[in-house]
Amino acid sequence: MEKHALLVYAKKDIEKNRWFIDRLTSLFKERGVDLLLKTPEDCGEIPDPLFVINRSRDPYVSRFYEEKGIESFNNSETVRIGNDKLEEYELFKKLGLPVMETVCADTPAEEIPFSFPIIVKERAGHGGSGVFMAESADDLDRILEGKNPAEYIFQEMCDEPGIDVRLYILGGKTIAAIKRTSESDFRSNFSLGGKAEAMEPDDEMLSAAGAVCEELEPDYIGLDLIRNKGGWVVNEIEDAAGARMLYSETDLDIARLYMCHICEKSSQNAENGIE
């Protein structure tokens, strides 16, 4: 009898991630698992999957199944923190990692501990969306016009904008590092036209990744670092980390590696019986 599991995406993200969805579905099929694609709104129709791969960025999906004793990849705490940039900053501070100073955007101007230019980020943004640079108070007003300031953060600008490194972390280990650069934008995201190249992560990067993994126990995430004052500063967690740069710049088949990790972890529960 074929077993079933869930792959959950927000409806708006399905088509642009179609290749990765089809790849995961095919790989799990080889292992006797029917991977059912659902959105957060309709995943509750499947009450007893073997496990849930939650790529929707919605922590309530993971929590719903965890409360039923069903494992979610990533776990609900990783999904919650990894999709809230203020929560990420507070986690990094708690872990003693180097960060850029950050405050909620509803902080009074006189209490902001850094000067212009200021980076403005939507707390729930991802992939470079919802990120702006304000050169002045007028810019801040324009960016936040009609928006809820509690949903945004202000962040100190690093001194080497347009450069970052994405660490790809699978099963608690850094499996790749991709350096991204942009000559035309303070954001270096690959999806926004930044250039990408594989590199060897240094001890500073690996130490930061290890601290985050020890705290959150994620299954598959990206961890982004930026350059400031000659060193690497932890910037963001990407919960539903994309795979385009890995397939473009390395020989890694992240979909297969992720599938193997999930099957191995799930098979620790004898009832799952994943071969």
Image (cartoon, rainbow, N blue to C red):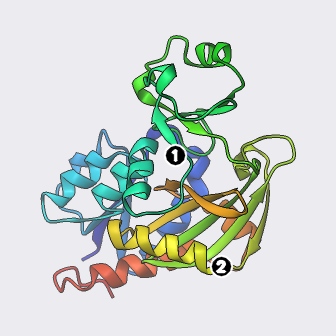
Q: Position of residue 103 (x, y in %)?
A: 46, 35
Q: Residues within 10 Å of mark 1 (few under 14, many from 20)?
A: some
Which residue is labeled 1 in the image? 14
Mark 2 closeness class: few <14, some 14–19, many ≥20 residues within 10 Å: few
State the CA–CA distance, disc 1 to disc 2: 35 Å
Q: Quadrant of the C terminus?
A: bottom left
Position above or below: 144 against 254: above
Point out the frontmost of discs 1 and 2.
2
Image point 64% across, 16% down: which residue? 137
Which residue ends up furthest to the left in the rendered image? 68
* Residue kind at label 2, given as amino acid type: Asp
Whole-percent x and y of residue 73? Answer: 35, 64
Query: Residue under circle 2?
Result: 202
Outermost residue toward the right in this view: 183
The residue at the point 29 percent across, 67 percent down is: 4
Locate residue 191, reporting x and y percent.
70, 48
Kind of residue at disc 1: Ile
Residue 115 is marked as: none
Task: Tell me which numbered mark, 1 or 2, is placed earlier along the sequence.
Answer: 1
- Visible in this render: residue 198? yes
Q: Tag 2's secondary structure?
A: loop
Residue under the point 52% across and 59% down: 21
Whether residue 254 sits left or right of residue 36 in the image: it is right
- Place residue 165 in its image quadrant: bottom right
User: Which quadrant would residue 222 be assigned to in this image?
Assistant: bottom right
Q: Is residue 186 left or right of residue 273?
A: right
Q: Viewed as shown, does residue 116 lie left or right of 58?
A: right
Whether 118 is drawn above or below 38: the answer is above
Q: Toward which corner of the image does residue 206 lie, by quadrant? A: bottom right
